[in-house]
Image: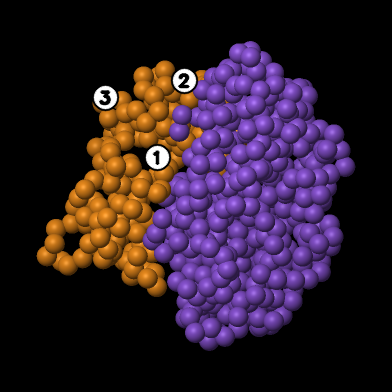
Chain colours: A purple, B orange
Amino acid sequence: MPRLVSHPDEVKVVSKRFGQGAANIDRYIELGGYESAKKCLAQGHEWIIEEMKASSLRGRGGAGFPTGLKWSFVPKQSAKPKYVLVNGDESEPGTCKDHLIFLHDPHSVIEGTIISGLAIGAKTGFIYLRGEYRYLLEIMEKAVADAYAKGYLGKNIFGSDTEFQIITQSGAGAYEVGEESALMESLEGKRGVPRIKPPFPAVVGLYGGPTVINNAETIATVPHVIEMGGAAFAAIGSPRNGGTRLFGLSGQVERPGVYELPMGYNLKKMIYEVGGGVRGGRNLKAVVPGGSSTPVLLPDEIENLGMDFDQVGKAGSMLGSGGVVVIDDQTCIVEFALRTISFYQHESCGWCIPCREGTDWLKKSLTRFHAGFGVAKDIDNIQYLAENMMGRTFCPLGDAAAMPTLGFVKKFRKEFEDHLNGKPCPFAKHLEVAVI
Amino acid sequence: MSPETMSIFSPKVAARFDALVEKYPVRRSALVPMLLYAQDEIGYLSDAVIAEVADRIGITELDVRNVATYYSMLRFKPAGKFNVQVCTNISCMLRGAYDLYERFQEELHIGHKGVTPDGVFSLEEVECIGACCWAPAIQVNYDFHDELTPDHVPGILDIYRSKSLGSTDHA
């Protein structure tokens, strides 16, 4: 079972019911659950969207788009049915926050989905979980069935004349399906390849209807925003970055775990105080701040870095999924880069050539380089390849592979050079990484 | 599927599939989960599975294969009864996933995508399974085991070995 952690600096909003037995619907209600949905039903869609806008809640999947604004893009009138789609395809390496939400607080996802549906005028919501999360899907399915039994879902939710249905769905192993348009393709029973945009999902989405797609953490946050009020939620975080976030501390840190901290929390403090510092008293070499697709940061870059979308963006990286991966001084960056790119090579859906070929060549170059057969111009070639993938693909997977690669090459060029001329890797035990 | 056609699935799974195709606004949305549940029962996507799924959804077998080949959890030949999936992605790698993976290889005498001769175990190196903060982590079929060291390996294998002796159907 995933271990729960806690730290005095945490502000528990989304995680406040973790470990409280809230997967049981009666317990969830006892802890104040479903009151936000009832309130939204009484207040109406415009009020909901205003509260969401006031909350400065930004998408927790990685892009950080303001949730209230996203909802406001859905046309009021539509000939085709509108849908809410919850993205629980959590697959970005370094990210396991939704795992805990589904495990400990599945009803918050249901309640958030209902509220999102009320806001945009949808009658159906889908909750999509990655195929590996079977035990969590079973928890979600039970929670949905319990909500139907209480009359919180169905033709007349909470005794009103409003209808809302929830359908749960399982994936079958594909990182790419976490991309919103690929997720819709998968849900329509197709290969999970991205769609060209525009049209955006808010206009033409699932089954051609206007669709709002939100990350599971975003959706689970929604009932709390309504409960405390948008302005109060916004006040917890930093400017334009409302509320708290479930940060996943992993890698070579003393106390790994999912910690809920206010947006804007200092990254150095997060590693050294909340996480207890680098494992085994070693020195910090680098940090991946928001899942494996985000460019690596050096120790001197995190000194005064607040963890919100704007500050991390300004520092040349991204807040992404909030998965903070700590790397100690005994780690080979070339090996780490190779393992990172091997993942994207494996997961590239093959739809666009710059991503399909680019990730493949990056993996080949890095494999050869790490094995000690690199030549000096390989370093520039790797950089050139990555630069030419950027912005040239349908979906962000190409960028997700290129961005961290550029970070590793630019910030650790010396370590790459140390692998030249047949010199053995000073750190690694494994010459061949990732046979997948 | 018409009642006169024989299903290759157990009555329970067949009934589940009858309901699954009615669950969505569009029948085809049942395809991906149906393939996964079919694999859970049969062990892999055999030609007979592909044919019946195509029939149930109302699309061609080629359409089914086209989709099935996309998803990494779906397979076209049998795995072991217990498929050990070791995550070696970054968070797990940094906490010793490769040592763990090596130990599984040693204990089982098989490599990536190998199956033990008795068919009880198979082994796979997999991408991130969403247990990064409890690394290194593995999945055996759908069960998670986290915060592991190589010394945990024999004990984990013993659990599943005894399960294998206790029952004959697919886990």
- Write down the residue under mark 2: B103
1 or 2: tag closer to the N-terminus: 2
Q: Are marks 1 and 2 in contact (CB under 8 Å)?
A: no
Q: Residue furthest front?
A: A377
Q: Classify residue A56 by image quadrant.
A: bottom right
Residue A419 location (% of width, % of height): 65, 19
Q: Secondary structure at mark 1?
A: loop
- Which of the two residues, A123 or A33, is positioned nearer the viewer here? A123
* Image quadrant containing the C terminus of chain A: top left
Q: Residues within 10 Å of mark 2 (few under 14, many from 20)?
A: some
Q: Amino acid at mark 3?
A: Pro
Residue A22 location (% of width, % of height): 59, 57
The residues tagged by marks 3 and 1 sit, at their Cα atoms, a distance apart of 18 Å
Q: Residues within 10 Å of mark 1 (few under 14, many from 20)?
A: some
Q: Amino acid at mark 2?
A: Arg
Residue A227 location (% of width, % of height): 72, 69
3 or 1: tag closer to the N-terminus: 3
Residue found 34% across the figure and 59% down from its top = B31
- Write down the residue under mark 3: B117
- Write down the residue under mark 1: B141
Q: Are marks 2 and 3 in contact (CB under 8 Å)?
A: no
* Image quadrant containing the N terminus of chain A: top right
